[in-house]
Image (spheres, helix red, strand yellow):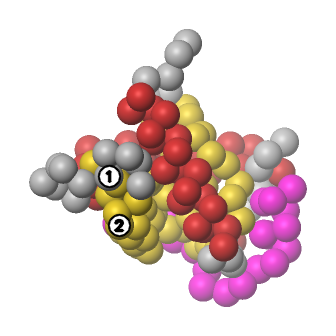
């Protein structure tokens, strides 16, 4: 199936965000992970924190910043997707309770030529009170190594 221009633009800015994350110490463990009808744009490890990053982009001619599209319904969908992602990790033997979890957002405003006008990255864009998103505040390199080894199997 041919991708729409909107999907191609989204893919492009997700790639830009993933590269920014890598340069800033994140290890990408999944991209465009999907369990219908929910999707996670980027899942990464940052130390002992599993980070679910939603990427939003908008043309500079829009009047709303792109992150405004992460509304309550989108947050609920991201949370449901993250719960499914955590279940898959647990099925692979990863103790997700040993990881901190965080929902971040990247907001990219671009010109009509797809040149970046502004890139904003928000840590803890929203907080989920579900117990599955609680975790320890300590570094745990064994969990990180375990996760990197199993998530892409």
Q: Is residue 140 left or right of residue 62?
A: right
Q: Residue 87, position in %: x, y?
A: 63, 46
In the displayed structure, 12 sits above or below 128; it is: above
Q: Residue 58, position in %: x, y?
A: 29, 49
Front residue (pair 112, 71) = 112
Q: Is residue 84 left or right of residue 10?
A: right
Q: Is residue 24 visible?
A: yes
Residue mark closest to the camera, 2 vs 1: 1
Mark 2 vs 1: CB contact within 8 A? no
In the displayed structure, 119 sits above or below 8; it is: below
Looking at the image, the residue that sits furthest to the left is 63
- Tell me which residue sits at (40%, 67%) in the image: 119
In reply to whether residue 128 is colored magenta, the answer given is yes
Q: Which mark is residue 4?
A: none
In the displayed structure, 117 sits above or below 77; it is: below
Q: Which residue is mark 1?
A: 111
- Callout 1 environment at 10 Å: few (<14), some (14 to 19), or many (20+)? few
Can you tell which quarter of the image residue 142 is in?
Answer: bottom right
Q: How many marks?
A: 2
Q: Is residue 111 left or right of residue 147?
A: left
The residues colored magenta run 126-149
Q: Is residue 51 left or right of residue 76?
A: right
Front residue (pair 114, 43) = 114
Q: Which mark is residue 118?
A: 2
- Tell me which residue sits at (28%, 48%) in the image: 59
- Tell me which residue sits at (63%, 77%) in the image: 24
Secondary structure type for disc 2: strand
Q: Residue 108, position in %: x, y?
A: 37, 58
In the displayed structure, 57 sits above or below 34; it is: below
């Amino acid at each position: 199936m041919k991708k729409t221009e909107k999907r191609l633009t989204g893919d492009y800015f997700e790639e830009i965000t993933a590269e920014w994350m890598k340069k800033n110490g994140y290890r990408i463990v999944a991209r465009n992970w999907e369990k219908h009808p929910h999707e996670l744009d980027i899942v990464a490890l940052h130390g002992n924190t599993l980070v679910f990053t939603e990427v939003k982009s908008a043309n500079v001619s829009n009047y709303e910043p792109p992150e405004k599209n992460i509304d309550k319904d989108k947050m609920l969908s991201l949370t449901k997707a993250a719960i499914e992602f955590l279940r898959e990790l647990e099925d692979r033997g990863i103790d997700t309770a040993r990881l901190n979890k965080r929902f971040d957002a990247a907001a990219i405003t671009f010109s009509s030529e797809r040149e970046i006008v502004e890139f904003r990255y928000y840590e803890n864009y929203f907080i989920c009170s579900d117990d599955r998103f609680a975790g320890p505040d300590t570094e745990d390199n064994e969990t990180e190594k375990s996760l990197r080894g199993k998530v892409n199997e």
